[in-house]
Amino acid sequence: MGEERDSVGPDAGMFVSLGNRVHVVDGMGSYIGFRKDRYFRDARGRALEGQEQRKFRRLKRVYSTRIRIGKEEPQYRALRTLNRVSKLLMIADQVRDRTAYLYKRILSEIPGRSTNNILLMAVCLLIAVREYGNDAPITLEEIADVFARCGHRVSIRAIVRETLRLRSITGYVPSVRRPEDYVSRVVSAIVNHDEVVRRATARGWKMKEYENSLRSALIRVIENIPVLKRGGRNPFIFAASAAYAADRIIAAEYKRRAVLTQKITSMATNVAEYSIRDHFGVIKSILREMSSTDQKVASSK
């Protein structure tokens, strides 16, 4: 307490009272023993007598989840869904806690108004991952898909519509992410794929060297293509396709055979192979056009 924060990023922990957890509904008190205890001890660690064991077992059963959460059952179910979604997306605890904080804050600011708690949770998750930027490179499609996997009807259109409806409260307007935001995720997915490791090693690469070279070339490819020429393409698919182009670039620079194929890139990044083929054709033509323009300018000088 009293320690100054080092980071300027969002922090959910600073908004929570001591002993409370922001991502669950804890109810009015603590558990009797540990959460799933069926055998009880006193404060000194000595086992209770049989009659006392039965007494506390009965009290623990009476103190059920439904009694503890009271009228907050919709919140309880929404937060339980958030915890499951967080595990499926493998996001950091800070992003999960920030999502839970935003959810509770928005609920407190719209009292008496009916709302879809699951849809609101999806909106808060979208806001949280956008706040954390490169630390949480989750796409809107993935958010909608993971809620659907959990049995909830949450579409991309519904999330965007609800986000726009709540912008007066959240102060957030959804914006399209850039391919730069997915560089780390795409590179990590590629260099950790078994087939990529096998092929890179066979071509004389050390994996750390290959990873650094691929990242550097990928950033160069994205930076050399103006935003207006990207044509509103999906930024994650564009980044994955640019990684395929970057692999061909470093293969030429280091005079080695290319490691990636469109099929391997598709398997590593979970992007459809035809999408990579289509995006790569656009990337290649743009880079070729810009290269020829630069050569003409240089010759004229």
Image (cartoon, helix red, strand yellow):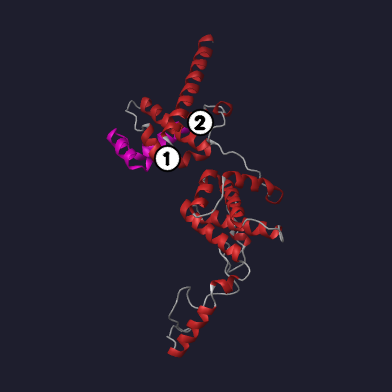
Q: Residues within 10 Å of mark 2 (few under 14, many from 20)?
A: many
Residue 115: give its label.
none
Q: Earlier in the sequence, mark 2 or mark 1?
A: 2
Q: Residue at x 41, y 42 (%)?
A: 189
Where residue 32 appears, x then y in whole percent? 51, 78
Is 214 magenta? The answer is yes
Q: Residue at x 57, y 44 (%)?
A: 156
Which residue position holds label 1? 269
SS type, badge 2: helix
In the image, 37 versus 72, the foreground residue is 72
SS type, badge 1: helix
Q: Residue at x 45, y 32 (%)?
A: 275
In the image, 224 versus 285, the foreground residue is 285
**Picture quadrant where residue 76 is located:** bottom right
Question: Which of the image's four quarters has the C terminus?
Answer: top right
Which residue position holds label 2? 222
Is 244 magenta? The answer is no
Residue 113, above or below 70: above
